Image (cartoon, helix red, strand yellow):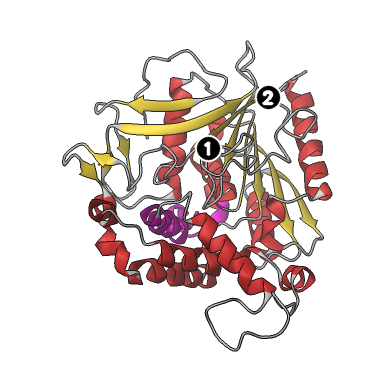
Amino acid sequence: MSQTVIESPAIETNGGTLRLPADAPLRLDSGATLAPLEIAYKTYGRLNAERSNAVLVCHALTGDQHAASAHPITGKPGWWSRVIGPGLPLDPDRYFIICTNVVGGCMGSTGPSSIDPATGKSYGLTFPVITIADMVRAQAMLLDVLEIETLFAVVGGSMGGMQALQWAADYPHRLHSAVCIAAAARHSAQNIAFHEVGRQAIMADPDWRGGAYEAHGVRPEKGLAVARMAAHITYLSEAALQRKFGRELQRDGLSWGFDAPDFQVESYLRYQGASFVDRFDANSYLYITRALDYFDLAASHGGVLANAFRRARDVRFCVLSFSSDWLYSTGESRDIVRALNAAGCRASFVEIETDKGHDAIFLEEPVLHSALRGFFESQASRRGLA
């Protein structure tokens, strides 16, 4: 799909918010359009004279554009500060790193909490359903404005890995390389089931108010916290939970009740839920989880995953998985690699042995960092990046 290219502003080395006017709509898979459109993004490093060193980093379900900078709400370090930074695999002295908040998000990009220009009120549930392809289409529009024709790499884990695959399928001519970490080419029934539990928890909260909670001055914090607790369990492995918490009690003796957590693992999950509601919007959670559930890269290619990559034979791929990840298993990563091979694409694959589960994407994992560094170094050498 062709996109309108807007006159390029001066590129800020720390990003900002791109505002696309009504005559440059984002056309969605559902048939709806979004206009005007805002895309919030952060950048790290500088674009070189050849405009050949740009790397797009795609975030996971509850991530945002603050990949390597302090979060403005929580004050915590960026979610990928272990990978992006001087001397790290993605060094801003070498690469121009871009990270956007996905469409449907709640950190500046147009989403359900944004103002609908037709009503002057928050979209709420009138916001159109979005897909992973829609997120990628919006990112491509941003790159058009920044006058970046080709990416050195697109990289992401979890939902970010799905975006990387979608980029390879939809815009292979704009990519040199793609890195997919702990992801899948389609959402499984088990993952859809976990998401539905989370959505129902949100919608069962009396403060959800049919998605119009902002108009009532309330937020479905309890439901959103439960959704986060359920999802967070899927990010950890059984071994990691046992190692970190076991059956350790929160205090001496049992409470013989339900108000206070007895076990440390209960306290941990309650903390995860409570801290999450401070930085995330409940309706965005509904929309982004639905986008993940709809993701099936083969569906629009005759049901054959290899067909999605037929035009990507010039793209170099790196696929990484974690041995203890049961959210997106190594088997699903192998399916991606087999499809890439069948399409005639060049792909490297590493299964990383770890007991940290899906969350290893964001934790200190030396093998992951070594694999990323090695892949980027080899591709930078091929592209002549100093």
Q: Is the magenta stretch mostly helix, strand or loop?
A: helix
Q: Residue furthest left?
A: 119
- Residue 19 left/right relative to 169: left
Q: Is residue 72 above or below residue 93?
A: below
Q: Is residue 290 magenta?
A: yes
Residue 310 in which image quadrant? top right
Who is closer to the viewer here, 57 or 3?
Answer: 57
For label 2, count other residues whose C-alpha is less than 10 Å away and answer few (under 14), some (14-19) or many (20+): many
User: How far from the left and from the top, in percent, is residue 54?
Assistant: 61, 25
Which tag is nearer the camera, tag 2 or tag 1? 1
Disc 1: which residue: 72
Q: Which residue lies furthest to the bottom in this view?
A: 256
- Residue 355 left/right relative to 121: right
Report the amino acid beneath label 1.
Pro
User: How far from the left and from the top, in percent, is residue 102?
Assistant: 46, 42
Which residue is painted at 64% across and 66% down in the image?
Answer: 268
Q: In this view, does 37 lie above or below 362?
A: above
User: How far from the left and from the top, in percent, is residue 305?
Assistant: 55, 55
Quadrant housing the C terminus: top right
Quadrant housing the N terminus: top left
User: How far from the left and from the top, in percent, is residue 146?
Assistant: 48, 20
Q: What element carries label 1?
A: loop
Q: Is residue 217 something that shows in the picture?
A: yes
Report the amino acid beneath label 2.
Tyr
Residue 49 in which image quadrant? top right
Who is closer to the viewer here, 264 or 127?
Answer: 264
Q: How many labels does the image show?
A: 2
Span of residues in magenta: 282-306
Q: Tag 1 or tag 2, which sits nearer the N-term?
A: 1
Disc 2: which residue: 95
